[in-house]
Image: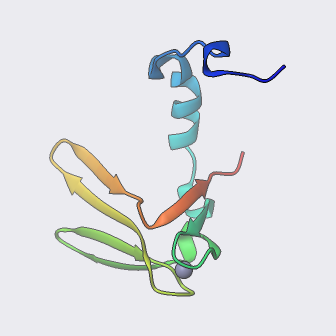
Amino acid sequence: MAETALDFIPVDGNAVAGDLSGLFARDVTTAMICCGGCGASAEMGSVRVYGGAMGSIFRCVTCDTIVVRMVRTPRGFAIDMRGATHLLVRA
Ligand SMILES: [Zn+2]
């Protein structure tokens, strides 16, 4: 029998608070980021970063697509990852 949306009961983000805490407590420089432009994967620590007072721009080492934009604000960090397909954080 095929699964339907009704087979899953959604919960809120608090239900995965432990997983989120573990994720963001890691060294993210070893996480693999996959470029949305060319599909190449690279460790976050190896991508080219252009930074300044306004924030940082992370570019794919293969095709130069912007994979991450990061801005530090008085209230925290804002991270835009629209240029990446995903970020794989190793266990
Ligand atoms: Zn790329």
Q: Is residue 6 left or right of residue 82?
A: right
> Residue 44's spot in the image, x, y percent?
54, 67
For residue 46, what is the image quadrant?
bottom right
Q: Is residue 60 left or right of residue 74?
A: right
For residue 66, what is the image quadrant?
bottom left
Q: Is residue 29 above or below residue 60?
A: above
Q: Quadrant of ligand 1?
A: bottom right
Q: Residue furthest front?
A: 1
For residue 53, what is the image quadrant?
bottom left
Count the numbered circles shown: 0
Q: Quadrant of the C terminus?
A: top right
Q: Is residue 76 left or right of residue 57?
A: left
Q: How is the image coloured?
A: rainbow
- The foreground one among 68 and 56 is 68
Q: Residue at x 54, y 16 (%)?
A: 10
Q: Quadrant of the N terminus?
A: top right
Q: Residue at x 31, y 70 (%)?
A: 56
Q: Is residue 5 above or below residue 75?
A: above
Q: Residue at x 34, y 73 (%)?
A: 57
Q: Is residue 42 above or below residue 5?
A: below
- The foreground one among 26 and 71 is 71
